[in-house]
Amino acid sequence: MENSLKQRIDAWLDQDYRLVFYERITLCREAEAMFRHLPPALAYAKTFAYLLENITVEYETQGMFVGKVKQIIPTDEERRAASALYSRWWDMPLEEFQKTAYFCYSFKKNSREWLASRPPWLITQGHLSFQWKELAENGLSYFEKRAQDRLARENDPEARQYLEGICLSIQAIQNYILRYAQVAGEHGDPARQELLQRLSCQPPETLFEALQLILLVMLSIKRTISYDAPCMGRIDQYLLPFYERDIAAGRLTREQALSMIEEFLFKDMEGAALYDHMSPDSLETEVRLDVSGEDVPYFIVGGRTLDGVSCVNPLSHLFVEAIDELHMLKAPVIIVRTFNGIEEDFFQKVCKAMADNASLYVYNDETQIPAFIYYGIAPEDAEQYCMFSCNNPTIPTKMGSLRQIWFNLAIPLELALNRGVPFAETGKPRPEKTCEFALGDRLMGMMESGYYGVDTGALEDMRSMEDFLAAYSAQLRYLLAQLRQGLQADGAVEREANRGRMRIEDCFLEGTVENACDWVTGGTKYHQFMVNGGGLATVVDSLYAIEQLVFVQKQLTLPQLAEILRNDFSGQELLLRRLQNKMNKFGNDIPEVDRYAKVVVDLFTQAIQEQNRPEYLYTLMGEISTLRDFSTEGWYVGATPNGRKAGEPLSENQSPCTGADMEGLTAMLNSVSSIPFYHITGGPLNLRIHPSVINGPDGIQKLSALFRTYFENGGMQLQISVVDSETLRQAQREPEKYKNLTVRVTGYNAYFTHMGREAQDEMIRRTEHGAF
């Protein structure tokens, strides 16, 4: 890494958390008066253009690339004014919010500030992939011409306004780049002035030019409208021709390319904040006013073709090497697609970067591609899959933004044990509901409203484990049918609310311009809805405990066990301790336990598929993920047969229950690989490894061999934090000494010292693996 870049990174790590791109707030207030009354697409595009016409162009002399916004520390009065503006925009009933935000199944409690900073008429949700390949090959004029040509063939007034908005938005980005060209000239830099003038309307010719164009397009959108968790696509594939031409022409060496990519990756993060957006108890999170937040982009490298041919190329290596050099950055994230037979030198390079705590995760093509095909994605599209924020999948350019709900797998377990009634509601009249998934839950994506199921009969009549699993399956199927019912009702509201609307991503997706409608209402080829199964290990351990206590050892009847759980183990301390400490648990390579992981996930994904029909716009896709909400999910579940008391956290993501995996890394990975991931499209497996495990000359080779075996056995994903508990506790005591200590959270990384105390303590409680 160049010393000048290291100095800029050090300065970035010392930034004041109060910095805000305040110009945007002032200009949005002005634009509201001028444009909000216009038809939706024109109000959107004209506001976007007004912002790009009037924000300060910050011209830098440091670094290779240009592109930066002006940040200030607002006064208390300015902060109050911004908060009042946000309240005026968004303080509304849920029913009105649903129509105004015009997206559902994504708004979470800890994202209130994230949403509030967005003008209601200028929203994008991000979480998708633009046509980056087409941008690199053809430049911005390609997209403007496409929209202009489609506009010339359109007669419907609403569709014409939509297409006019697309054209105006692309022109606004072109004009913004021209503003940088003008300032370059004013700073006595005619070469850069000519380059930027050309990039505003013509395709790039070199790797540097392609990277500069991508940066300016990203900057213009992320800092004004937002483009949360942008998926940057398979960057090693679409930029390879530029690299190869530069090398062949002698314009670039490999070492220069590495330095350029390092600069590019940092430059894309330079305007981002240090805070952890999932730590609502952190002051830094509370005071944020910006629309762009952490701005974590996701770059995908590696992978294979459908025929098994490796796509690893020289740029794959360079991006992995670059993120390893930049291991002190919490972002961007490099997603490596691995596969059976991946080149050993490349995979060891990947493992070294992971061991260095670089911002890098690994996904397995051998499970991901079949999973997409299982849910109806064409094989040639599944081959191109990408990932973005919080380990969610996308089909780049052909799929709209993230829609999701966190489906609590422990709730149907409780319902199966109590004839479809929550433990806490036993003996009470069942409330009348039109849908089990209330609107508030649907908007937040969390199951918080007291869920009822179907009466699966008296427990006395369940004579075998198969009988009980049938009851669990019936509750799963009922709740997922209820979810589909709510989704369909919301679809009708959305279709009406979205008439004539556009989002900035509509400019850069396949199908939206051609169909003259946004992705929400059907503009793209695919429309996904992620159903994130949470608490998997809690349910697996509970099913094994039921099998042993009731059907094998016959120490309790099923009704007796249910009564003990209804009473939260009151007076049953010996049984509670036995379930907690003596019963076998998922995560220790015990086939009799691990088989229930396959049972539960098979039932889950089969129930999901029952709700996918040709007449439905949105396809439900299964994931195993809780993000950081495993504690929240536990609040709404009574005691479970694995020895978990009512209200306690569920298991996290794909991991075993906290502290349950006692037999080392190999055993834990063997257990997790029993999950049938070929029907699961996303979700993280977090590992925390003691540094001593990978110390020594053969540490990386051992790690590589372990991870290779995991993926060959059917594992889906890995992300690791190499840090011991004592270091984390020391960082809590002396945060100023650990400002660049990064940890893997869910689908993103955080600076440990910028996390809230609750999140820090949860990280310390995670199993620390001290041996293979």
Image (tube, helix red, strand yellow):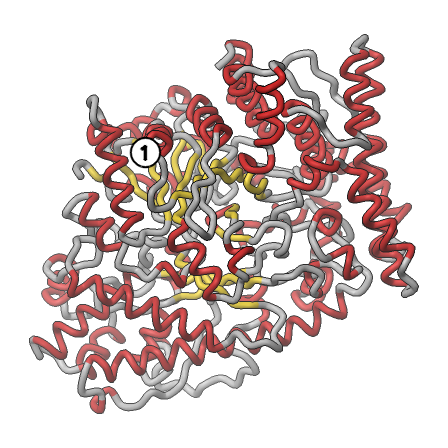
**Compared with residue 52, is residue 125 higher up or lower down, i.e. above or below?**
below
Q: For mark 1, what is the residue?
A: 344
Q: How many marks?
A: 1
Is 317 in front, or is 42?
A: 317
- Residue visible at 31% across and 82% down in the picture: 471
Amino acid found under the numbered disc labelled 1: Glu
Is 155 in front, or is 317?
A: 317
Determine whether, in the image, residue 519 is placed left or right of residue 358.
right
Determine whether, in the image, residue 743 is placed left or right of residue 497.
left
| Local SS, label 1 | helix
- Residue visible at 21% across and 62% down in the picture: 594
Provide residue 446's location: percent of width, then percent of height.
49, 63
Provide residue 680's location: percent of width, then percent of height.
41, 60
Question: In this rendering, does residue 45 appear at all?
Answer: no
Quarter of the figure with residue 325: top left
Is 398 in front, or is 416?
A: 398
Quarter of the figure with residue 295: top right
Question: In this rendering, does residue 617 appear at all?
Answer: yes
